[in-house]
Image (spheres, rainbow, N blue to C red):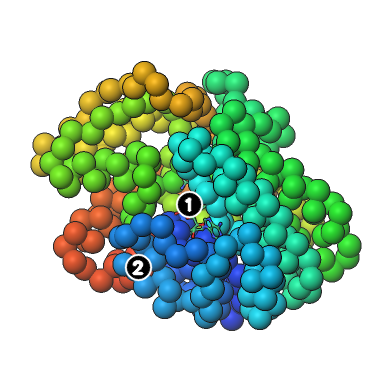
Amino acid sequence: MEAVVDARQWNGKRVFLTGHTGFKGGWLSLWLSRMGAEVHGFALDPLRSPSLCEVAGVAAAQASDVRADLADLPALTTAMTRARPDVLFHLAAQPLVRESYLRPLETFQTNVMGTLHVLEAARGIDSIRAIVVVTTDKVYHNREWEHPYREVDRLGGRDPYSASKAAAELATDAYRASFFSAAGAARVSTARAGNVIGGGDWSDDRLVPGCLEAFEAGETVKLRNPDAVRPWQHVLDPLHGYLLLAERMMEGAGGFVESWNFGPEDGNGARVGEVAAMIAEIWGEGASVLADPGRDEPHEAGLLKLDSSKARSRLGWRPRWGLRKSLEKTVEWHRAFLAGEDMSAVTLRQIEDFTGELS
Ligand SMILES: NC(=O)c1ccc[n+]([C@@H]2O[C@H](COP(=O)([O-])OP(=O)(O)OC[C@H]3O[C@@H](n4cnc5c(N)ncnc54)[C@H](O)[C@@H]3O)[C@@H](O)[C@H]2O)c1
């Protein structure tokens, strides 16, 4: 049976969230505070403007809002100690593959040592019941297989981003076994999701933000990797999975302290070219895309599919929005932004639509 987030479980819960100034963290903040949770954010200032944080009132949704680097363990420990959270979601990261080729050491520093700092700070805080460490579908040793990756498949990563997230998985596993295994200790799991789309993402080098920017300017989108297959999903779908996972861990049920895939329906991804053509059609106004593979592009995996049958059968999770609906919601959000609407209200309305509260 399909599970839905239990808002009553979140009402009054204290949540420590790293990465609240980012795309996924911003949506999660607004969702949590809408359910009555007290959200304590820890992250750097938004890297670019506009940002979801800035336009959708994410800062105002925080009970406390610390802007500091994960490298600063004392700042992290102080913020977490003051927050005394019940639950911790770790989302802060350097999340871009191409950026990781430009800044490999910083990517490893933030994604591996940053994760260890979060776990090290959390070790000393006995209020924490559940910790969800967010990694990615790119943690798998990619063999360009046709079949979707399962949680038991080998970890690896050819580019610095993927390898740093695979390393974060290993580091979390060691901390879980070494420091979070005693009775009463926080339960720790990792979550691996696919390529997420949704309103409020202005990151460089991501397909959907790139398309929207070009369409807005009346330009043709040039696709450097049109045949690459990725597991696309709306940002609310994996966030729903993270919330269900944390709920099960907070309830104290055994068997959840492991890794979880959260990918699109039936594990099948879609080609970059297909996604771009679909978003152009939804945008309208003659928007167009063109295949333009570059010659000296750094390596990125060609084929990546994710098997989410474990989350489906044991958490009752399933993706609620398919690819077309996810793209429609993204365009709807972006057009509302361009029209100068209240983006906090628009974002909350999309969350209510997702959870079925509007129907
Ligand atoms: N967006 C995707 O398609 C996708 C897919 C799979 C996994 N993920 C993972 O989800 C998480 C969130 O991704 P996103 O798309 O929201 O990224 P984002 O770039 O929008 O947000 C990143 C967040 O991390 C914070 N951050 C970065 N470096 C930091 C540092 N050194 N110290 C403190 N805070 C720091 C930023 O301030 C920001 O709040 C990441 O862990 C990412 O790897 C994202």
Checking the image for residue 54, the label placed there is 2
| Label 2, ligand 1: CB separation under 8 Å | no
338, 245: nearer the viewer:
338
Relative to 43, 132 lies left or right: right
* Mark 1 neighbour density, 10 Å: few (under 14) some (14–19) many (20 or more): many
Q: Amino acid at mark 1?
A: Asp
Residue type beneath disc 2: Glu
Q: Residue at x 17, y 47 (%)?
A: 216
Give the left or right position of residue 95, taking residue 221 as reference: right
Q: Dot 1: what SS?
A: helix
Residue found at the very far left of the displayed protein: 285
Q: Nearer the viewer, mark 1 or mark 2?
A: 2
**SS of the residue under disc 2:** helix
- The one nearer the camera, 157 or 151, is 157
In space, the residues marked 1 and 2 are separated at their CA atoms by 23 Å
Is 159 drawn above or below residue 199 in the view shown? above
User: For mark 2, does the 10 Å Cα neighbourhood hold few (<14), some (14 to 19), or many (20 or more) residues?
Assistant: some
Picture quadrant of residue 125:
bottom right
Residue found at x 61% / y 70%: 16
Taking the spot 74% from the left edge, 43% from the top edge, the residue there is 170
Q: Where residue 129 appears, x then y in whole percent?
A: 73, 68
Q: Nearer the viewer, residue 135 or 336?
A: 135
> Is residue 3 in sight in this rendering?
no
In the foreground, 50 or 34: 50
Farthest top residue? 295
How far across and how far down the image is residue 326, in percent? 35, 47
- The residue singled out by tag 1 in the image is 237
Picture coordinates of residue 66, whole percent (x, y): 54, 73
Residue 171 in sight here: yes
